[in-house]
Image (cartoon, helix red, strand yellow):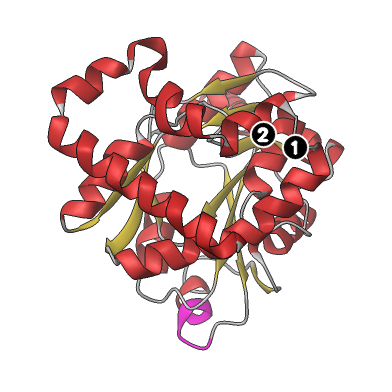
Amino acid sequence: MQKTSNFTEVSTIRSAEASVPMVSVVITTKNEEKNIENCLRSIKNQVYKNIELIVVDNFSEDKTAEIAKRYTAKVYFKGNERSAQRNYGAKVASGEYILYLDADMILSPSLVDECVEKCEHNNEVALYVPERIVGEGFWIKVRDFERSFYTGTVVDAVRFIRIDVFKKVGGFDESLIGPEDWDFDRKIRQVGRTGIAIASLCHNEGRFSMERYLKKKVYYNVGIQKYLRKWGPTDSEIMKQIGGRYRLMDVFIEKGKWKKLVRHPLFTVAMYFLRLRVAVGYLRSAK
């Protein structure tokens, strides 16, 4: 009788495990040997265990792929931009959900568990994940302050998605570089309900470089012009995403967020300085 009881208990456990949705975590990489291990370790340390780990590497010239192979056998090579890498990751994924990450991101331990719980019980097809900017120096703190205003807005993008919905909208537009997240996000919202996770992830930007930061923003401006042509310059969402009023004012004061500006005057002034530097860079690149 004891053997029968043990067999029944084991069968129940296996049945319960089988009913837990698999989550495919797709990490896109390019010469990320300094960051990739922290990202992979945070995934292995998740409370939620039914996770498929996929790394899509853009032919790194350092030890990124070598490090990744210590954590998963599913290391693939694909270029040229991250949209193509993300789409390829979704193509080879076996999970019911996909969480896409950059290699310099670190997950809080309960994140995947919470995301599955919310989507399974709230009928949500995708979730925004709060993002904390970490690194060295004063401007990193300013970037973190700025990023805290964007979660769940049109300036943000969903990161945890039901994979059937991901495929239904065609994944990421590989012709866009920079605003592909915005483009993908709005396609997802057109087909289902989205929500916001409470658990966060950390985005490690290292030591802040003003020159590198502005160059990156200007580089993405070319993609923004393509995005604008795709949806139309009078599109209400685009007017928010690239328009001065929303990006410089409304996103920071809506839903009572203005109180945060008042509580942190130094960060507020520094943030507006950073936003204006970006705006000037865009104007110069457009000439």
Tell me residue 21's x, y (percent). 65, 33
Tell me residue 67's x, y (percent). 45, 76
Relative to residue 253, is residue 244 drawn left or right?
right
Quadrant of residue 55 in the image? bottom right
Residue drawn at x 64%, y 49% is: 179
Q: Nearer the viewer, mark 1 or mark 2?
A: 1
Say which element carries label 1. Answer: loop
Instruction: State the count of labels.
Output: 2
Judge by depth and name the residue closer to the eye, 284 or 73.
284
Report the amino acid beneath label 1: Pro
Judge by depth and name the residue closer to the eye, 120 or 238.
238
Relative to residue 252, is residue 208 drawn left or right?
left
Q: Quadrant of the C terminus?
A: bottom right
**Numbered badge on residue 238:** 2
Q: Earlier in the sequence, mark 1 or mark 2?
A: 1
Asked if residue 120 is among those painted magenta in the image, a careful observer would answer no
Tell me residue 32's x, y (percent). 44, 73
Asked if residue 65 is among those painted magenta in the image, a careful observer would answer yes
Residue that mark 1 sits on: 233
Say which element carries label 2. Answer: helix
Relative to residue 90, is residue 216 drawn left or right?
left
Relative to residue 2, is residue 35 drawn left or right?
left
Using a 10 Å C-alpha cutoff, classify the residue at mark 1 as few (fewer than 14 neighbours), some (14 to 19) or many (20 or more): some
Residue drawn at x 21%, y 38% is: 269
Residue drawn at x 42%, y 32% is: 248
* Magenta residue span: 61-66
Quadrant of residue 239 in the image? top right
